[in-house]
Amino acid sequence: MSSPSTAPAPAPRPAWYWTCQVAGWGIYAGVNFLLFRGHAPFLVAAALALIFSLEGLLLTHAYRHWIHRRGWRELPAGALLLRALPSLFALAALLVACVPLNVLLVRSLVGAQPRPEFDMLSPGALAGIFFNLSFLMALWSALYFGYHFVEARRRAEIDRWRLAAALSEAELRALRAQVNPHFLFNALNSLRSLINEDPARARESVTQLAAILRYSLESAAQPTVPLAAELRMVDDYLALEQSRFEDRLQVRREIEPAALALPVPPMLVQTLVENAVKYGVSRQPGPGFVALRVARERGRNELVLEVRNRGELAAAGDSTGLGLANARERLTRLFGPGASLQLAAQADEVSALVRIPLASAARANALTQALQPAA
């Protein structure tokens, strides 16, 4: 009989263990009763079947404690087999040794006698009983050790996943730690230019910068955030930049409402928009623009984020590429190799296109769940 357990303690799940024990040995009692009933009166058959099953239950329960005390569940398969095989034959021999006592006990308690042809004490009958009990003990051992082998593999897989998730999260935190000061430096530069030019707008910009920093801090501990929250922060950022560039910065938005609840890495859209402003609008002598498009492409089952601006890729030649490199790394770690970030130039426009497979949202959610403390 299988003995469910999720911990090395002797009785980790006693309810499951006893359910399996009672059910298994109860079936054994029922089968024996049907076999004995053809050769013995009802009470004799019932008594013998019940005693055999009780002895089997108690003996395997004692065997289970022996297994725990000897640490057999932690042994490799070969070493375990060398110990389990002699043990199951020993268990069968012990039960066979009890057969004469069982017969005497039933005769004394019930008083009825089995038919003459039903001789359980003959050498042939005892050999058959030993063979059957050996098979039964082998089945019990296979179920018991097999269950714990599967459980050990499952726990090891969970531990590996949690370790990988924790490592990935640590690396993600390191990447975000690099991006946030980079963004703050640029935002403070934008604010500095407004203090002397327009103090009232500078005060409003301070409020917007505070909202941006609050979002940055609150999202720092999260692998992903809803796209709607990211876009609210982007709106504050663009409002801050419009205070500096005024009519030179035109903002175009094309947002699909159905995409707002989908998860994205924090600061991802902001990084793309910031690059568009820094390497596009700020370097154009005339009016510039930042166009943001968000949509769910159902044909390819993807979330598409696109940021376009006027300019050329060559204009970003003096960039360290830190923001985009980190964005790509976070996309891959959270959503797998199917996620991508590509830059392209056409005519006088530069486009940053992000594709996130919608099915990979489960990957990001699993990462968050794996990092939660175990119940």
Image: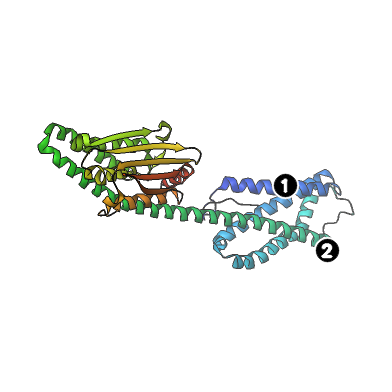
Element at badge 2?
A: helix
The image's mark for residue 198 is: none
Residue under pointer 1: 27
Residue 217 occupies quadrant: top left
Callout in the foreground (2, 1): 1
Q: Which of marks 1 and 2 precedes in the sequence? A: 1
- Residue 31 in view: yes
Cα–Cα span, label 2 and label 1: 26 Å
**Residue type (three-letter) at the residue carrying disc 2:** Pro
Horizontal and vertical percent position of residue 124: 84, 62
Element at badge 1?
A: helix
Q: Dot 2, how many residues are within 10 Å of its Cα: few (below 14), some (14-19), or many (20+)?
A: few
Horizontal and vertical percent position of residue 266: 34, 43
**Residue type (three-letter) at the residue carrying disc 1:** Ile
Horizontal and vertical percent position of residue 16: 59, 46
Residue under pointer 2: 123
**Residue at 73% in and 59% down:** 135
**Residue at 79% in and 47% down:** 33
13 and 218: which one is in front?
218
State the residue lying farthest toward the front.
Answer: 347
- Residue 111 in view: no
Q: Is residue 150 left or right of residue 281?
A: right
